[in-house]
Image (cartoon, rainbow, N blue to C red):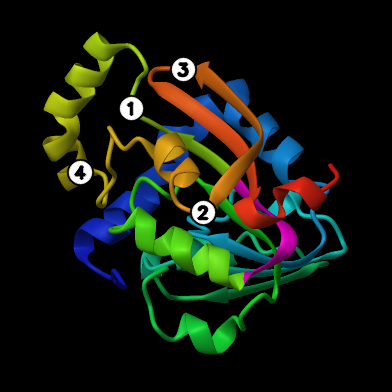
Amino acid sequence: MKRNTFYSRFFAYAYDAVMRKADQKELAGRRKALISRLSGSILKVGVGTGANFSFYGQDAQVLGIEPSGPMLKRAKEKLPQKGSITLYQAGIEDPELDKLIPHASLDAVVCTLVLCTIPSLEAALDRFHRWLNPQELLIVLEHIRSKKETNGKLQDFIAPAWKAIGEGCHLNRRTDTVIKNNGFETVKEDYFKQLVQWYQGIFIKSDNLQTHQL
């Protein structure tokens, strides 16, 4: 669903400042490591304010989608002079994307700090599976529900309020498990902590895992 509300404008204005410390401490380095070697046709789901733009290589042709008009406006200000990044206002559930992205046409799908906000993660994964070329990658960097049950229950308690102020963010989503249960196999993964539990993973469509070489 496209978002252009007053609160969306405020959220976009504040986002970079809120995330600056986490990015400087660790997240920016992880983004770069996951993205910089990608090439070919890439879908970036939820470009946000454009935090990933500087990490794509010259051989990457990126289609970036973002449902928030204010976020997209800020992202356009960060577009590099060189490289190939095309931006489009849409959420992953938008049916227009099937016209933009043919079946088995993508070399990578990149999801960083976005899968928590998608209304139906299972439906999104089904589309990723359909759009990805055989042997190609789903790249993920997300916060997830804590593996420690006490912390997880705290996240469950906070989740409704967090969703209201976080533009639909599900603080307690078990993203790692949902991906593995919906057509993808893990190539590489890492769990790490900041204020909450974080997860990064590289996945491939499960029916093609055996043929992929990192």
> For the residue labelled by badge 2, is the local secondary structure a helix, a strand or a loop?
loop
Q: Which residue is depicted at the point 37% across and 17% down?
A: 147
Ranked by sequence position, the earlier of labels 2 and 3 is 2
Q: Where, quadrant-wise, is the C terminus in this rendering?
A: top right
What is the C-alpha distance between the residues marked 2 and 3?
Answer: 29 Å
What is the C-alpha distance between the residues marked 2 and 1?
Answer: 21 Å
Is the residue 213 above or below the residue 30 in the image? below
Ranked by sequence position, the earlier of labels 2 and 1 is 1
Q: Which residue is depicted at the point 87% across and 61% down?
A: 58
Give the labeled residue for mark 3.
194
Residue type at mark 3 is Gln
Ranked by sequence position, the earlier of labels 2 and 4 is 4
Give the labeled residue for mark 1.
145
**Contact, mark 2 vs mark 1 (Cβ under 8 Å):** no
On screen, residue 26 versus residue 148, left or right, reads: right
Give the labeled residue for mark 2.
183
Residue 171 in the image: x percent, y percent? 28, 34
Any magenta on residue 137?
yes
What is the C-alpha distance between the residues marked 4 and 3?
Answer: 19 Å
Viewer-nearest residue: 53 or 128:
128
Q: On residue 89, which mark appears?
A: none
Residue 88 in the image: x percent, y percent? 52, 77
Question: What span is colored magenta in the figure?
Answer: 132-139
